Amino acid sequence: MDFRQLRYFVAVFEEGHVGRAAERLSISQPALSQQIRQLEQDLDVSLFQRGGRRLLPTLAAQTLYGHALPLLDGLERAREALRGFRGQVPRSLAIGVLQTVNASLVPLLLERLRVAQPQLVVQLYELSGIDIERRLLTGTLDVGIGFLPPRQPGLHALPLYEDELQLVMAADHPLREFRKVSLAQAAALPLLMLGEEFRVRQIWQEQLAAIGRRPQVQAEMNQMGAILDSLPNTGLVTVLPGRARQMTGARELLWKPISEPRVPLQVGLVYRDAQRQQAVLDLLRSLLEPLVTAV
């Protein structure tokens, strides 16, 4: 018994008809019938009985079918995993992206992926940094795009570009004339921030802790767009990566670099298995690098 015979058996079992199964498998009916007879001889059991024009599975066939499906599924999963060793991109690609990472990146990446790999089904998820790393470890994501370095052991990173945290405020804010705002000045300002599960918030808290300060968070939201919409009506400020400015659209907001010290950010691809995912990483890097350097 081999995997080919199991695949033939499953087709006959599900179709209940040699002709339809042969058409499904793209082989001749005599060849398929011969393989089924050979399988019955190898196993020393009868798998099908004729009932009119249909083939009726025996109890032995029902037992074999229950074991054959997970075996064939496991074989396909193994083949999918090994495509990376042959430099082939898989058929589907699940990518987790931080909402604070270069808002114009995703639509441009999607278009480039569609042109480069038209057969590839791309699944994009906007997630927090914690969720991206958790899903990478459980295997429900293939690649993440986020801030480096990853925090979970077992994850690796490939840098793409650098950014920095900036202070974002309404056009009539008292600090509107300042070209830059020091970290100590920013620490004293009342904030409207993303929640604590977001990496930007964590980085900001780490920076303030280094100078013995705590962020003055007065309100939280879990959507960057909603925060930007709210700033002109609240008198609050927020802290975001500089490249997120592309999301402002028609909003009249001021973006002030943070200094003394500046807060650099490194953005890149986060992944679990470099050897298995090398083809995907090479593809994404080749498509993303021209986009991030053009901004």
Image (cartoon, rainbow, N blue to C red):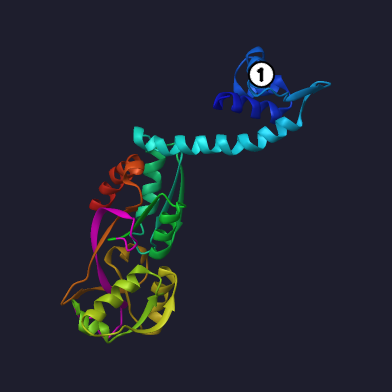
Residue 231 vertical placement versus 273 (above, below): below
* Residue depicted at x 70% and y 29%: 13
Residue 163 vertical placement versus 287 (above, below): below
Residue 50, percent across and down?
Answer: 80, 21
What residue occupies the far front of the structure in this picture? 44
Left/right placement of residue 266 relative to residue 51 reads left
What residue occupies the far top of the structure in this picture? 30
Query: Which type of secondary structure does the marked residue at label 1 adopt?
Result: helix
In the rendered image, residue 177 lying in the magenta stretch gets the answer yes
Q: Quadrant of residue 35?
A: top right
Magenta extent: 150-178
Residue 214 vertical placement versus 250 (above, below): below
Q: Quadrant of residue 168?
A: bottom left
Residue 26, percent across and down?
Answer: 59, 20
* Residue depicted at x 45% and y 39%: 120
Left/right placement of residue 3 relative to residue 215 reads right
Residue 53, percent across and down?
Answer: 80, 20
Q: Depth check: give the residue in front, 251 or 50.
A: 50
Any part of residue 128 in sight: no
What residue occupies the far right of the structure in this picture? 52
Rate crowding at label 1 as few (under 14), some (14 to 19) or many (20 or more) other CA atoms within 10 Å: few
In the rendered image, residue 285 lying in the magenta stretch gets the answer no
Q: How many marks?
A: 1
Q: Depth check: give the residue in front, 279 or 171.
A: 279
- The residue identified by callout 1 is 41
Quarter of the figure with the N terminus: top right
The amino acid type, in three-letter code, at marker 1 is Gln
Any part of residue 225 in sight: yes
Left/right placement of residue 293 relative to residue 16 reads left
Q: Quadrant of residue 185?
A: bottom left
Q: Depth check: give the residue in front, 217 or 112.
A: 217
Quarter of the figure with the C terminus: bottom left
